Amino acid sequence: MPEQCNKKPYATRYEARAALLIFFKRGRKERASYYCGACGAWHLTSRKRRVP
């Protein structure tokens, strides 16, 4: 099992995107998803997406 970082992991980019829609509906700040190589999962960030 890869080492987990302190952010919520998403198994796929699609799951992260689904959570993204929930954030939009709640009126949160715009968020972007990115792949975390450290723990091998997708995460959401409040910053603009950086291309790995």
Image: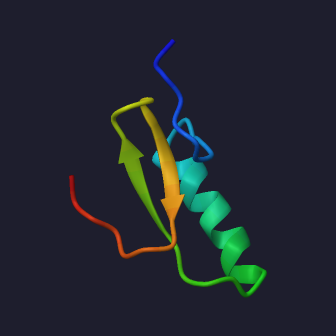
| Residue 4 x, y percent position in the rendering | 53, 29
Q: Residue at x 73, y 70 (%)?
A: 22
| Label total for image | 0
Q: Which residue is drawn at 45% across and 29% down?
A: 39
| Residue 1 x, y percent position in the rendering | 51, 12
Q: Which residue is drawn at 55% across and 35% down?
A: 11
Query: Which residue is at the far left?
Result: 52
| Residue 37 x, y percent position in the rendering | 33, 35
Up-down relation of residue 1 to residue 29 (above or below): above
Query: Which residue is at the far top?
Result: 1
Direction from residue 52 to residue 45 in the image, left or right: right
Up-down relation of residue 42 to residue 25 (above or below): above
Q: Nearer the viewer, residue 50 or 4?
A: 4
| Residue 7 x, y percent position in the rendering | 58, 47
Direction from residue 26 to residue 29 in the image, left or right: left
Q: Nearer the viewer, residue 18 or 23?
A: 23
Q: Which residue is drawn at 51% across and 51% down?
A: 43
Q: In which quarter of the image is residue 24?
A: bottom right
Q: Which of 15 and 41 is in front in this view?
A: 41
Up-down relation of residue 31 to residue 42 (above or below): below
Q: Quadrant of residue 20?
A: bottom right
Query: Which residue is at the far right?
Result: 26
